[in-house]
Image (cartoon, rainbow, N blue to C red):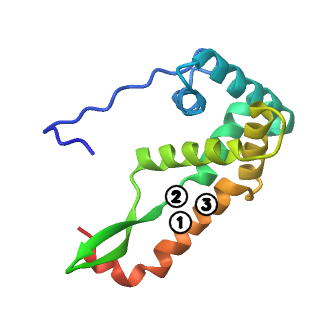
Amino acid sequence: MSRRKSATKREILPDSKYNNPVVAKLINVVMWDGKKEVAENIVYGAMDNLKKIAKDGDELAALLEAVDSLKPSVEVKGRRVGGATYQVPVEVRAARQQTLALRWLVGFARKRGERTMKDRLFGEMRDALNGQGGAFKKKIDTHKMAEANKAFAHFRW
């Protein structure tokens, strides 16, 4: 969290192939050690695989649908009140929803058992479209946690 008076978000330019900022953000999340070309090859390879199962062969729409299915609407944040820490449910801003969805997608893709990262990412995207997989389970667990702690909603700040 920035302590400056006016924190400005940097604009992420759209990627070169699909001209879409969500794909550019996905590439940045996949990227390790500044190796952007390697990350692009992984993401574009996964998108090519996604084209085979996508409706009308539109892999970009399938990716956006997968990311939308992973976006959480509520999460819990720790709030200290009188020496006790309560898990308070709060609504998630749109930018954070997208960030969390992409982070979960890539994080759970890295833990999968397929041979290449391209196949892992494709598998996690496919599972997100079908309402299953680790990232989708994480979203459901986040919503359940917020629902369970609804009694502490009055501590929201």
Number of the front mark, 2 or 3: 3
Quadrant including the C terminus = bottom left
From the image, tell me which residue sits under label 3. 138
| N-terminal label among 2 and 3 | 2
Q: Are marks 1 and 2 in contact (CB under 8 Å)?
A: yes
Q: Secondary structure at mark 2?
A: loop
What residue is drawn where x is 58% and y is 27%?
A: 31
x and y percentages locating residue 73 in the rendered image: 48, 60
Give left or right: position of 26 versus 132. Answer: left
From the image, tell me which residue sits under label 1. 142
Q: Is 28 or 34 nearer to us in this picture?
A: 34
Q: Label 3 to label 1, Cα distance in Å?
A: 6 Å
Task: Work out whether residue 58 can be spotted.
Answer: no
Q: Is 94 or 78 nearer to us in this picture?
A: 78
The amino acid pointed to by label 3 is Lys
From the image, tell me which residue sits under label 2. 72
Q: Label 2 to label 3, Cα distance in Å?
A: 9 Å
